[in-house]
Image (tube, grey):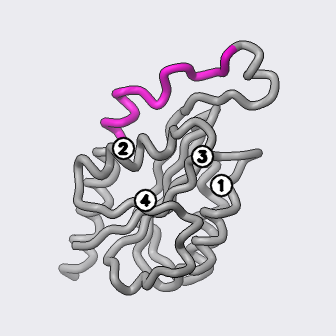
Amino acid sequence: MKILVLVDSHHQGNTMKIAEAMAEAAPLTVIKAEKASGLNFDDYDIIGLGGGIYFGKHGASVTEAAGLIHDRPVFVFSTSGTGAEKNNEPLVSLLKNNGAEVLGSFACKGLDKFFIFKLAGGINKGRPNDGDLENGKKFILEVIEKYGKKERK
């Protein structure tokens, strides 16, 4: 099974930490989302899209990459100051509109040093933490299991 994960993680590196934890649990290739336009998505069984959340949605490079993906099994993940999974909904909707089958969505808190939070050194210091990384590992294994069940039907 070949899994591709496209990641936008440029401020604190929070989302990349989750992607790297997933890579410890499952064989996957992690690439920066900004390089998605040159990829052949048919070479992969599952495609993941992950990024930090900015003003309630994923960054531009992840959203642009999602626009390139059609009719593929996918999953979405994010890190943010709130850790709210609802922030993944716009990306999930875009992918579904492109005919993608969304196998799962994952979100956790991450260090946030935006604007006023910067004055205090940020919020969610130490996040994602070991528990978040373990949850990311569990999540990717659940995605693989769900994909496997779909393939057996």
The answer to which of marks 2 and 4 sits earlier in the sequence is 4
The stretch drawn in magenta includes residue 131:
yes
Please, what is the three-letter code of the amino acid marked with disc 3?
His
Label 2 – label 4 distance at C-alpha: 11 Å
Q: Which residue is mark 2?
A: 136
Residue drawn at point x = 29 percent, y = 52 percent: 23
Q: Which residue is mark 4?
A: 104
Residue 33 in the image, given as x and y percentages of width and height: 55, 64
Q: Which residue is mark 3?
A: 10
Q: Secondary structure at mark 2?
A: helix
Residue drawn at point x = 34 percent, y = 49 percent: 139
Residues at discs 2 and 1 in contact (Cβ within 8 Å): no
- The crowding category of the residue bearing disc 3, from other C-alpha atoms within 10 Å (few below 14, some 14 to 19, many at least 20), is few
Q: Is residue 71 left or right of residue 51?
A: left
Depth check, front residue: 12 or 2: 12
| Quarter of the C terminus within the rendering | bottom left
**Rendered position, 60 above or below 70:** above
Residue at the farthest top position: 120
Please, what is the three-letter code of the amino acid marked with disc 1?
His
Q: Which mark is residue 87?
A: none
Please, what is the three-letter code of the amino acid marked with disc 2?
Gly
**Rendered position, 70 above or below 113:** below
Foreground label between 3 and 1:
3
Q: Secondary structure at mark 1?
A: strand
Label 4 – label 3 distance at C-alpha: 23 Å
Residue drawn at point x = 29 percent, y = 62 percent: 28
Residue drawn at point x = 31 percent, y = 36 percent: 134
**Rendered position, 26 above or below 101:** above
